[in-house]
Image (tube, coloured by chain):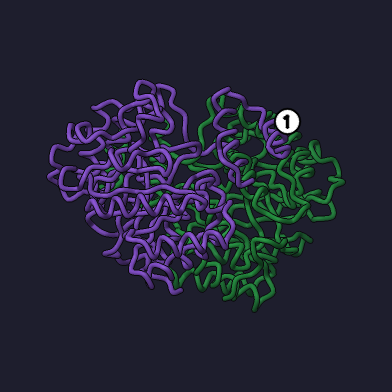
Chain colours: A purple, B green
Amino acid sequence: MAQRGDLMTARADIRVLDATIRDGGLVNNFNFSDEFVNALYRTNVKAGVDYMEFGYKASKELFDVNKFGKWKFCDEADIRSIVGDNNSDMKIAVMADVGRCDYKNDILPKKDSVIDMIRVATYVHQMPAALEMIEDAKAKGYEVVCNIMAISTAKESDLDQALLMVAQSSADGIYIVDSYGSLYPEQIRAISDKYMEVADKYDKYIGMHAHNNQQLAFANTIEATARGVSYLDATMMSIGRSAGNCAMELLISFLKNPKYNIFPVLKFIEEHMLPLKQNGLVWGYDIPYLLTGRLNQHPSSAIDYMKQQRCDYTEFYTDLLEK
Amino acid sequence: MAQRGDLMTARADIRVLDATIRDGGLVNNFNFSDEFVNALYRTNVKAGVDYMEFGYKASKELFDVNKFGKWKFCDEADIRSIVGDNNSDMKIAVMADVGRCDYKNDILPKKDSVIDMIRVATYVHQMPAALEMIEDAKAKGYEVVCNIMAISTAKESDLDQALLMVAQSSADGIYIVDSYGSLYPEQIRAISDKYMEVADKYDKYIGMHAHNNQQLAFANTIEATARGVSYLDATMMSIGRSAGNCAMELLISFLKNPKYNIFPVLKFIEEHMLPLKQNGLVWGYDIPYLLTGRLNQHPSSAIDYMKQQRCDYTEFYTDLLEK
């Protein structure tokens, strides 16, 4: 595939999605204050962000509402308490995990909701369930994307088939998801080309959701962009599970479209992200996450290790190699 | 130019250079303990690192020896106190800055020195002086490389001429140096192709020295590698001026040659780098460095700002835009 766009011009098809609450919620069980979410919404609108993901539509049968903040469930009333009728150019997104969402009841018809986009997150082995969710959301009137997760551990032939299944569905877009932060730019370019081929044939767009285990989240995001990927996930100060995501401040400062504005992002970081760090919330690149990323493993063992505030990296590495 | 190598195989021409003491010395005025430098030397040998840079050969006329640690000057006796006759496969390098080095006196004939490589660091406007230093070091018997600094602010026509001047000198290699951490992988690939064309024509090798202002030091290093660049600078835990360099732990875990070993690197970080951080030494990616990198400016204003422990990023950004 040819390169699309260059470093001097703006691409009209680029969309930035802020996943701060959703992926960041995995760090603090979604316990963000209303003030924080309110300020983030207003920041994103000012910064030119195109979509703001509020959290998950998680099943209240499976998950105890008393054990998580409200953004794990994203009730319509809770989103409206922040955005009202969302009189802005920014769209509202939520994520629905296959097998963890009572989507038939909990996702309302679009006409009754301020939500614009449903992001269906799935593993390759769950594709039939994902397709039912995609068609349900589409029939209800939403923009729908499918995030195929953990592709670095999927068989390539399975991934190819999953990709074709989404391509032939009603989904509007498909996301490349580097769940373990294990992929190098060279691989991301090849994967982007593969997804873009499907996109061009079936009239979908492609998105990129990166993790920073090897300090490659931003690099992988802009490399995917150069191959034609257009929906770009980022989070404030890269907050997100384990090593976090592509940092919004890096992405916004990279993009050339004058609609994007770094200033409100810096202000939000100064006023709202630094206090999270100061209060002890831990995320972002660190050696244990590098090691799970490099070994193409789920970061859960690194997260447990970091919670114990251990620094015996050699012990941790030896343990990983035993797995 | 074509890609060289791939993600599955090892390239025999790759050389890793540890710049921990030299670039890290810019953070602590070269005040590393003998124990630290000793442990680093032994770590690098075990990890398969090819070159260890001990510091600068700075002029004692220009710089007060009482104001800096000894690795700003790299006296022969001081290096030998760590490495003896260096009975290892690893080579010893030092950096000599144009205009700040009494190279005629302070760089001994190779037969009297345990140093193997002289790295001449120059700006494009200093090329005639750099060439004299290159020829002096070569005549004395050293492997010589030339680091052309701050290329992101040089005129491209000047850089092309500087490159040709080094190409026609006795230097063995030429380094791409992203001094301000302002370059994106797409630019690094184009620059690498330009340097590799010279390398192939004049039988030189090309190196990469990256900075992490935009979290791209590792990405830019491996992208340069894929275009044929073979000498790769890294530092332990990325220690170096402002946002630091390409992290050794990332680079060593990426390279496929079985000679490279991550384990001693992790041990060194655990035992020697974490204490530096705990004792208050500050380096590595942070918002102010991102902003100077993005604006293609020297990081000095960000370094001053960080020393004041300020977090009013919006004020700092406004100040930068006034410049």
Vertical placement of A283 versus A1: above or below? Answer: above
Q: Amino acid at mark 1?
A: Asp
The mark tally for this picture is 1
Instruction: Tell me if A221 is positioned left or right of B200 in this view.
Output: left
Instruction: Tell me if A240 is positioned left or right of B223 in this view.
Output: left
**Residue in the picture at 64% in, 52% down:** B254
Q: Quadrant of residue B7?
A: bottom right
Given residues B223 and B75, the one toward you in this image is B223
Q: Quadrant of residue B14?
A: bottom right
Check disc 1 and report the residue beneath it. Answer: B34
Given residues A236 and A134, the one toward you in this image is A134
Q: Quadrant of residue A299?
A: top right
Instruction: Tell me if A128 is positioned left or right of A115 in this view.
Output: right
The answer to whether any part of residue A34 appears in the image is yes
SS class, disc 1: helix
Q: Position of residue B3 (x, y in %)?
A: 60, 71
Chain of residue at mark 1: B
Q: Position of residue A306 (x, y in %)?
A: 56, 28
| Quadrant occupied by the N terminus of chain B | bottom right
The crowding category of the residue bearing disc 1, from other C-alpha atoms within 10 Å (few below 14, some 14 to 19, many at least 20), is few
Given residues A250 and A75, the one toward you in this image is A75
The answer to whether any part of residue B310 appears in the image is no
Given residues A92 and B294, the one toward you in this image is A92
**Residue in the picture at 86% in, 44% down:** B85
**Residue in the picture at 30% in, 51% down:** A136
Q: Position of residue B140 (x, y in %)?
A: 77, 60
Q: Position of residue A159 (x, y in %)?
A: 52, 59
Which residue of the protein is positioned furthest toward the bottom in this rendering? B201
